Each structure stands twice: as C-alpha cells, then as structure tokens.
Image (cartoon, rainbow, N blue to C red):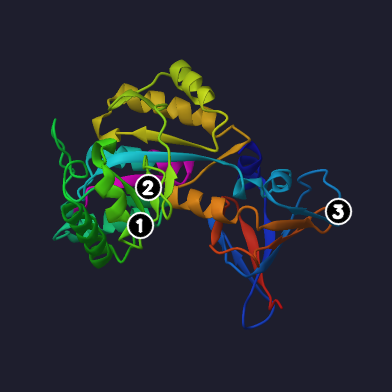
C-alpha cells in the first residue's frame, strides 16, 4: 500500500471510460474513487512516471499485476471487522468512523439488525452516510442473543436461524435500500444449522469465521487487533501477532470499538499508522475481498508508454473500485 498512498497523494490523471456521447472531459476538484465495471477497458494517463516497467508490455494474473501501479487490485487483504453496531451511533462509534474517514480506508461494521426498526431520520442518515464512506454493513444477527448454553446461531433450529437471517436482510433493505452480502455470527458461535440457513438465502455469500462449505465464501478471523474483547493490543503485541499471520492471503482485524477507552483508540491508531505503510496489503471490506479473489486472475494491465496504462476488465464478473485522493481529470470515450 505504500505505492498506493503515494499515488493517492500526488497524482493527477486522465481517465477514460465508456460513454454514449463520445470523448468528453470533466475536471473535478475531488474524486475519491473510480469503479471499474465488468466487460470494460479503461486507459489511465498519469502526469508523472510511476515505475521502470518496460512499455508495450501486458501484465496478466495476480503475480504480474503486483508489479504494476494498480497492484492493490490483487494485493493481500486487511479487513477491519467492527462488531456490534446498533442504529443509534454512540460517541465511541462516531469516533471510530471518524478515524476511518481520516485514514480513508474501506472498513466494515456488523449490524445488530432489529435495532433499525422504526429508524429516526437522523439514524437513517447516519447509516446511509456510512454506506457512502467505504463501509460495508454486514449481518451480525437479528438480536445478538448470547448465553452460556445457547446463542442466536448456536442451538437454535434451522427455521429459527433462517428466519433471523431473512428478517434482518429484509428490514435492512426496506429501511436503507441496501443488500447485505456478508454474515458473521454473534460471538462467532455457530452450528450445523447455520450453514444450511445461509445456503438457503442467496443474498448471503461471505461468511466471517464460517465453516468451509461449498457455495459459501469463508473468511477467517485472526486475534490480532484485540487481546480480549474490547481491549486493543499495544503496538509491539499487534505487530508480533500480525507477523504471525503474514503468510495468509487475508488478515481480519476483529474489534469492538464501542467498548474502547481512550487508550484503546490510541493503540489502534498506532497500529493503523504501521499498516498503511505495508506494500503487500490493501484495506478492503469482506465483500470486496470476495470479489477481488474471484476476479484477480482475470484482470490485465498493459503499460502502453511511460505514462499510459490500459486496464482490461472484459473477463471480470464484478465491479472494482480504485481510490484516489488528489485532483485529476476524467475523460470519456466510446470503446469497442
């Protein structure tokens, strides 16, 4: 991500996308993301040389794409998994989201879904704003029930678990016009009925801390960010734990910011300062990680000349977003 941060802070670019009206420039003072659509070919013309790669060369597949300035499309993933969000944001949740906005990184929050019944206009606006701010809301249960002997998705029948998932998805879509694609159980406590219930609901594809089941995409959770629930690790402990999982393709940072003290926020901020310097990783949400894994061997990048790169998304299945923080010019043209 070191190269990405340099790109975001210093570059202007010309960017070509498909448009019905032919070539059309559009100069914008601040654009934070560009979404590459499946089936399209894009051309980026940068204002400065970014690498020493030879021109007239095509880079295909993950290992080769890692050499290019667009390497974050295929980089290893860092997923921030923040648990136990409710409709009404507490001061701690507001502080956490402000931190994510300052760092401008994708992140995710597990929503306890029944809390958004009868949303106030202010709470609806807060949740909608998060969806516009690189945040994925994922399904963290209907009521987040936990006891010593039973949990919402452990010990409940298939019908009960299915109903809680269905209620949650339908309510979130009705209130926010948003479809959740990711599920993580309260307390990460699941049983065999959980997999069957998830498979019966086509919207849910990604399973955090799930069992390996055909038809579902499971993402592991690593005990890196917190030493216990609601206690952020100090920097030395965080770095040691992160390095332990360095060979993994994705590292999921499970956190509970609503329980944090000032010291916890300080420790987590120090960890973020180290993570944004890592060259082999990119922050992404759970569903973004899924789409990247599905498509990363089907994206090609051609270095046309010292400043120009062509991105071929004709064989991909999902849109992919690249983030910028600097001013650039957007151009459009009809493409074959």
Q: Earlier in the sequence, mark 3 or mark 1?
A: 3
Question: Around disc 3, counting alpha carbons within 10 Å, would you say few (fewer than 14), some (14 to 19), or many (20 or more)?
Answer: some
Q: Residues within 10 Å of mark 1 (few under 14, many from 20)?
A: many
Whether residue 311 is visible, yes or no, is yes
Residue 37 among those drawn in magenta: no
x then y, percent, for residue 27? 62, 66
7 over 244 or under it: above or below: below
Q: Which mark is residue 204?
A: 1
Label 3 vs label 1, nearer the camera: 1
Secondary structure, mark 1, is: loop
For label 2, the SS is strand
Q: CA distance from mark 3 to mark 1?
A: 42 Å
103, above or below 240, in the image:
below
Residue 306, x across and y down, in percent = 83, 53
- Which mark, residue 207? 2
First to last magenta residue range: 99-113
């Amino acid at each position: 991500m070191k190269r990405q941060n340099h790109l975001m802070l210093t570059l202007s670019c010309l960017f070509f996308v498909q448009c019905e009206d032919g070539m059309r420039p559009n100069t914008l003072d601040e654009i934070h993301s560009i979404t590459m659509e499946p089936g399209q070919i894009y051309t980026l013309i940068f204002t400065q040389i970014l690498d020493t790669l030879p021109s007239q060369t095509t880079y295909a597949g993950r290992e080769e794409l890692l050499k290019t300035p667009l390497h974050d499309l295929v980089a290893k993933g860092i997923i921030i998994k923040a648990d136990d969000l409710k409709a009404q944001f507490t001061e701690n949740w507001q502080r956490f989201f402000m931190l994510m906005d300052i760092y401008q990184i994708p992140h995710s929050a597990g929503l306890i879904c029944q809390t958004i019944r009868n949303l106030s206009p202010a709470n609806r606006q807060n949740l909608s704003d998060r969806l516009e701010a690189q945040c994925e809301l994922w399904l963290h249960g209907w009521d987040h029930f936990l006891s010593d002997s039973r949990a919402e998705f452990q010990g409940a029948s298939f019908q009960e678990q299915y109903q809680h998932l269905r209620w949650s998805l339908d309510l979130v879509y009705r209130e926010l016009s948003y479809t959740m694609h990711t599920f993580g159980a309260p307390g990460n406590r699941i049983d065999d009925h959980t997999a069957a219930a998830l498979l019966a609901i086509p919207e849910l594809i990604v399973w955090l801390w799930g069992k390996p089941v055909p038809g579902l995409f499971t993402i592991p959770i690593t005990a890196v960010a917190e030493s216990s629930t609601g206690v952020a690790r100090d920097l030395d402990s965080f770095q040691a734990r992160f390095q332990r999982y360095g060979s993994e393709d994705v590292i999921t940072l499970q956190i509970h910011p609503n329980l944090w003290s000032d010291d916890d926020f300080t420790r987590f901020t120090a960890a973020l300062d180290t993570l944004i310097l890592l060259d082999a990783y990119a922050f992404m949400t759970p569903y973004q990680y899924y789409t990247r894994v599905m498509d990363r061997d089907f994206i090609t990048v051609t270095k046309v000349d010292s400043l120009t790169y062509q991105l071929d998304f004709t064989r991909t299945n999902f849109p992919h977003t690249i983030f910028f923080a600097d001013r650039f010019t957007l151009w459009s043209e009809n493409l074959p």
